[in-house]
Image: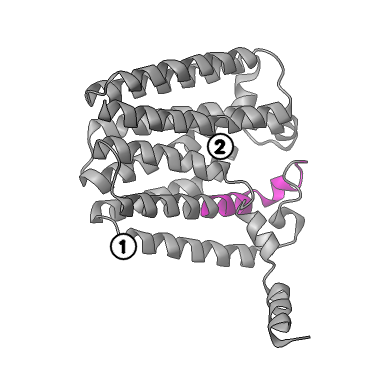
Amino acid sequence: MSAPAAFSSAASSILPWSALARLIRLPNQTGTYLLLLPTLWALVLAARGIPPLKLLVVFTGGAFVMRSAGVIMNDLADQAFDRQVSRTKTRPLASGELSRRQAYTLLGLLLLVAAGLLLALPPLVAWLSPMAVGLAALYPFSKRWIHIPQAMLGIAFGWGTIMGWAAVREQLDASAWLLFGATAMWAIAYDTIYALQDLEDDRRVGVKSAALYFGSSLHRGVGLALAAMLVLFTIAGWLNQLQWPFYCTLFGVGLFFIKQVSDLQEPVSPSRAFAMFRSHIWVGVALLLGLLGGVSA
């Protein structure tokens, strides 16, 4: 065996790269997109157009790093639960493919990278950043404490809008908090749909979720969250004097939301729930384009 091949073989035996990649959900970046897109909304609205390239690069990298760190925190907290759920029992920590020490090591490295990214941002963003880490760490435990843990996820994801706004304006305005609230409501809705995949397992192992809490009124709960999101978004647009492309986009997104809420009145299979969840990436993209059109029209 050649020296490079021997080194590669030794490295693979020491570091289980495939398992580490699956630990951070590298093959599935839906969560990264759903974390990044609201941050881009804030950057665009605060900058009144395309924000500086440096901010786009830093926040895109930050979304990937923090989402990766967040899922590691989630798996560390939920290791025992994940072993009892059919969808999650093959995750690297739940299956024993990775040790907790390996997971903590990777988590530490990711948080160091996140801290490094902060060096390129204004001091106010650095002051706000510990809250982002704290919220990510608290979310997994909220599934034990509150009936709608998706609210904690929404607050965690929404914090990116606060940091994005602060990076552009170096202050926090009412519009930043409106985007924060809209993001939180949006996350409650799409993560409730996501939770439909584990409905029976969650009930059996005792994990709380909005999907269980809403029960037969799930479509009403999701609909209320989506309606609140649209209202908050509309107010933010009005405060910033956005033009007609923004409101046309909101109208189209509203029709899509009505269709999803209508579909939720009937039983939804796990595969269908995941497809409905993933479609919210395109909602985020549409709203980003609407914001760009609204500030430039």
Q: Nearer the viewer, residue 288 or 157?
A: 288
Task: Please tell me whether residue 226 belongs to the stretch shown in magenta.
Answer: no
Q: Which residue is disc 1 drawn over?
A: 119
> Tag 2 or tag 1, which sits nearer the N-term?
1
Disc 1 residue type (three-letter): Leu
Residue drawn at point x = 65 percent, y = 30 percent: 275
In the picture provided, is 183 more to the left or to the right than 90?
left
Disc 2 residue type (three-letter): Trp
Q: What secondary structure is the magenta-colored segment mainly?
A: helix
Place residue 267 in its image quadrant.
Answer: top right
Task: Please tell me whether residue 74 belongs to the stretch shown in magenta.
Answer: yes
Place residue 48 in its image quadrant.
Answer: top left
Residue drawn at point x = 65 percent, y = 19 percent: 215
Q: Position of residue 291 (x, y in %)?
A: 34, 29
Q: Is residue 294 above or below residue 78?
A: above
- Find numbered disc 1 in the image and state the secondary structure of the residue it sits on: loop
Q: Position of residue 72 (x, y in %)?
A: 58, 54
In the picture provided, is 278 more to the left or to the right than 249?
right
Q: Position of residue 18 (x, y in %)?
A: 69, 61
- Find numbered disc 2 in the image and state the secondary structure of the residue it sits on: helix
Q: Is residue 124 above or below residue 104?
A: above
Quadrant (top left, top right, bottom left, bottom right) of the N terminus: bottom right
Q: Which residue is disc 2 drawn over?
A: 145
- Mark 1–mark 2 Cα distance, whole angstroms, equals 35 Å
In the picture provided, is 19 more to the left or to the right than 124?
right
Place residue 279 in its image quadrant.
Answer: top right
Magenta region, residue range:
69-86
